[in-house]
Image: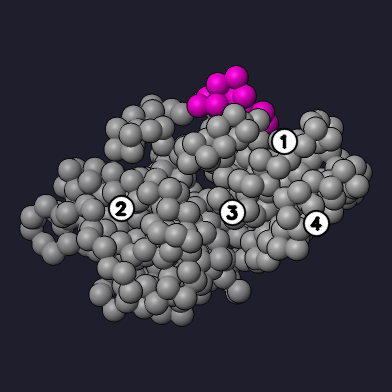
Amino acid sequence: MNTLPSPSGAEPTDGPAVRLGALVPLTRPGWAEAGRHLLAGLDLAVREVNDAGGIDGRPLELVVRDTAADPGRAAAAVDELAGMGVAAVVGEYHSVVARAAAARADALGVPFLCSSAVLDALTEAPTEWVARLAPAQSHGWRIYADFLLGAGRRRIAVATQPSVYWASGTRILRDHLTPRGGTVVELDTNALTPEALCDALVDHGATALLLLVGHPEPAVPIVRAVRGDRRLAEILIGAPAGQPEFAEWAAELDEDGAGIPFLRNLPERLGPLGERVGKELRERLGEAPSFVAFEGWDTVAVLAEALRSHGTDRAAIVDAWPSVAIEGTRGPIRFSRTPGISVWQWAWTPVQVVDRDPAEPDRFRTLHTG
């Protein structure tokens, strides 16, 4: 198990630190840039809680574990953190990894507040031990499907890789688009080179290609191939999972990475709290914070409220889920039981479809709001 130093050193106070285990992808094959943003948000919020007196005079402390997008590693980390006596586990970006962490937390009776993963079936059966801030995949991806229909794109091709997450996304898109006159064809990127995928797009007469694949491979080569194929000059490339959100995407693809719509869990305009936190995050990250960084900050803000109002006992934290109500960076946060979702859910985070402006790739354009 890769043990990392806690970035938010706790200041001396009247009692022992209240520890939170943090699951974050910080190394490949995890999306390390997303992990860096998530950790920046978590750490900033912990420091602010401690600056305000901590939890009844006790400091809050993050104990960070790198999941590297490995479900087994995440489950082992939950075991380790539970044995260390953490009050709760927070974080994670990758859905399949978060699902493994949630299953282990549920089995051990450890509260898990998932920051960024969206897979609807985060646990196999309903549980009291897990809550989530990110919108469920079915909610966000239906909004994306509505955007496609509004843009007149009905012949949809999805470039896929084997994964529960990508298979779930494909099913959501197909179930939403088919009754509304759309079609969805799957193209297996394990069987097709980027050039062969371009031929298949032409053969199917696709008007949109959605990247339901990993980054940078094979997403980046696919984008380059499609952008370079004159036959596909009018096709829309989309990435509902949010790959173009991060600066790494723009650095790798330059202008080819612009004009690719993706889902972003942010309101059209941030309120005063979001503006303040966003400024602090920008200074920490050295770049504009992604929505994932805001998810990290909101995660700790929710846990801090639960700890203050209900105490640091694990069962008490779980009792707090239905009554927690705070102002987050992206709006008021409350949890509820949502049909079809097995965990306590914030329903719903603001969701947008945005892209990088082809005329100014560092600027984002809002194309659709859900």
Relative side of 41 to 194, left or right: left
| Relative image position of residue 66 (x, y in whole percent) | 36, 63
Which residue in the protein does label 1 denote? 228
**First of labels 1, 4 by sequence position:** 4
Distance CA(mark 1)–CA(mark 4): 21 Å
Distance CA(mark 2)–CA(mark 4): 44 Å
Which residue in the protein does label 4 denote? 186
| Relative image position of residue 121 (x, y in whole percent) | 62, 66
Q: In this rendering, is residue 239 above or below 258? A: below
Distance CA(mark 3)–CA(mark 2): 38 Å
361 part of magenta stretch = yes
Callout 1 secondary element? loop
Callout 4 secondary element? strand
Labelled disc at residue 217: 3
The residue lying toward the viewer, choosing from 306 and 217, is: 217
**First of labels 3, 2 by sequence position:** 3
Magenta segment, which residues?
355-370
